[in-house]
Image: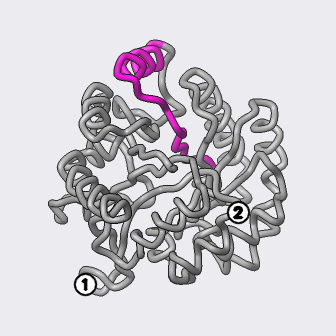
Amino acid sequence: MFKLAIFSDEVSQNVKEVAAFCRKWKLEAVEIRTLLNKGPHNFSKEEIKLIKTVLKDNGIKVCSIASPFFKCTIDNKKEYEQHLDILKNCIDLAGATGAKIIRGFTFWRTGIAEENLDRVAEYFPEPVKLMKKAKMVLGIENEPATFVGCARTQKIFLEKIHSPAVKAIWDPGNEVMDADGIAPFPNGYRLVKDEIIHIHLKDALSMGYEGKAECVPMGEGQVNYWGQFKALIEDGYSGYLSLETHWRINKAEIKKMSIEKPGGAGWSFGAKESSEYCMRNIMKMLGSLKK
């Protein structure tokens, strides 16, 4: 059976508040994106110690490090070197917190995805080497703003890399947000299910407010999450499902933030209440599967 987790900044920047949320909803783990108003690659040794202590005292694990690795411009040598340092720092954080998965991306999309995947793959030998040495897995997320934005390109890209150190982070909600996406479940899921190492939970409408794609509360969008959950149980998936709410009760506030670069205090404003709403919807869906 799969396990539930949540992104740290989809609750708060305060690690004690994140821990309290996890206890309330009986979540086994947290996925660290931003805490203390810092990204996962910028924590000091003292801050890492604080995060570890609070989570350990509350019986909460770290399931993944949600790094911004390779959310940068392709063919930019300076940014490439900077992001290798980001990955190295996230590997150190993962080692300190016991996480085995680090999220990564495939550069900002500046052209047709399929025409650039070979070019993107050329930048992965060094990251693969680093992950193998650390005995960790780099999870490539289907992110609409990057070259790998949907299940189809995710599958093609992973076949090109062909390494046990690089797997898929499946995000059904992002599949809806990508113009090239297909039905997240069952179609998208079936393409990548054998490569999935971790899953993000968000819901979306391709034609939402003002005709634009937007995130909505879990279970209220286009993703057939009831079917997705059922399939994960039947397929024996035992990894984590991490709530990445990406929706706020106060929609006026979410519009001021960057969906492509979430994090920090601004992002966490109103996050706890919104994630509470989504957790209630998730529990209702899971409860119906047990009947």
Position of residue 93 relative to residue 210, above or below, is above
Q: For the magenta stretch, what is the residue range?
A: 46-69
Colour scheme in the image? one colour
**Residue 219 position in % (x across, y down):** 31, 69
Position of residue 152 relative to residue 127, above or below, is below
Please name the amino acid that badge 1 sits on. Glu
Position of residue 123 relative to residue 148, above or below, is above
**Residue 44 position in % (x across, y down):** 48, 19
Sequence-wise first label, 2 or 1: 2
State the SS at label 1: helix
- Residue 72 visible within the image: no
Q: On the picture, is 126 further left or further right than 82?
A: right
Count numbered badges in the picture. 2
Residue in the image at 42% along x and 19% along y:
56
State the SS at label 2: helix
Please rate how many residues cluster around mark 1, counting C-alpha atoms within 10 Å: few if below 14, some from 14 to 19, many from 20: few
**Residue 136 position in % (x across, y down):** 71, 36
Residue in the image at 33% along x and 56% along y:
245
Question: Residue 107 sits in which quadrant?
Answer: bottom right
Q: On the picture, is 139 further left or further right than 205?
A: right
55 magenta-colored: yes
- Residue for badge 2: 194
Q: Nearer the viewer, residue 231 or 122?
A: 231
Position of residue 269 relative to residue 199, above or below, is above
Please name the amino acid that badge 2 sits on. Asp
- Residue for badge 1: 210
